[in-house]
Amino acid sequence: MHTTMDDLTTGERLDIVVEFISARTYRCGETRLSRLLVADRDGTRLSVLGIAARTTVQALRTGETYRLTGLLGATSPTLAPTDESCPDCGGPLRPGGTVDVIDRAFAQTAIQRDLGDRFGIMDTHTLVQPLTEGPAPEPGSGQLDRRVASPPDFVCRACACHVWQTDLGQLAVSEPIRWEQLPSLVEGECR
């Protein structure tokens, strides 16, 4: 039995063999992301987001087969309103998710580009190899960091701060790394 896109679970890492179909690059603030379209061995297609400047993303060739080790499963953020307000700015909160632990540009692109309910994230912990290059690293072999940070309970739609349920009613808010360099989720736009 082989791994397919059906095995992709949000918040968990997956090792999978895919065929590279196409790529499109978007700019979100200072971050350039590539939206890759790949297909598993059963032909099921899936979008994968990755930093466009990574050598591995630039080296992908249409029609070639690759092993993605440590692909992170994610779901598109929901903009469903919550009853809570940001303790920092008073703005509306949306539910947080795995996509929020990587970089704000990933969440922004997922919202604005309709990646579907599920997609993959190629982050710095994802290894990309042409299928012909040696055996896959064994899970837990120490070659890959398979950990995923815990997603926030909420993300402010106005100031983009991460908010945990325990922070509501207090002025304790955690900001993700480098977010101050990017436009807000509400006002920003990917090009």
Image: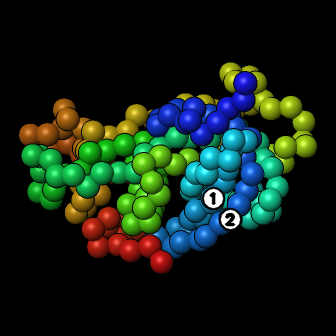
Q: In which quarter of the image is residue 186?
A: bottom left
Q: Where is residue 65 in the image (x, y as percent from the top left)?
A: 80, 50
Compared across the picture, whether 44 is left or right of 10 comes to: right
Which residue occupies the foreground of this view, 97 or 9?
9
Amino acid type shown at disc 1: Leu
Q: Position of residue 133 (x, y in %)?
A: 90, 42
Q: Position of residue 48 (x, y in %)?
A: 58, 53
Dot 2: few (<14), some (14–19), or many (≥20) neighbours within 10 Å? some
Q: Earlier in the sequence, mark 2 or mark 1?
A: 2
Q: In which quarter of the image is residue 143?
A: top right
Which residue occupies the foreground of this view, 115 or 146?
115
Which residue occupies 75% across, 51% down? 19
Name the residue tied to disc 2. 22
Amino acid type shown at disc 2: Ser
Q: Position of residue 110 (x, y in %)?
A: 43, 58
Q: Is residue 109 above or below residue 93?
A: below
Q: How far apart are marks 2 and 1 (CA)?
A: 5 Å
Which residue occupies the foreground of this view, 114 or 133?
114
* Residue 101 appears in the figure: no
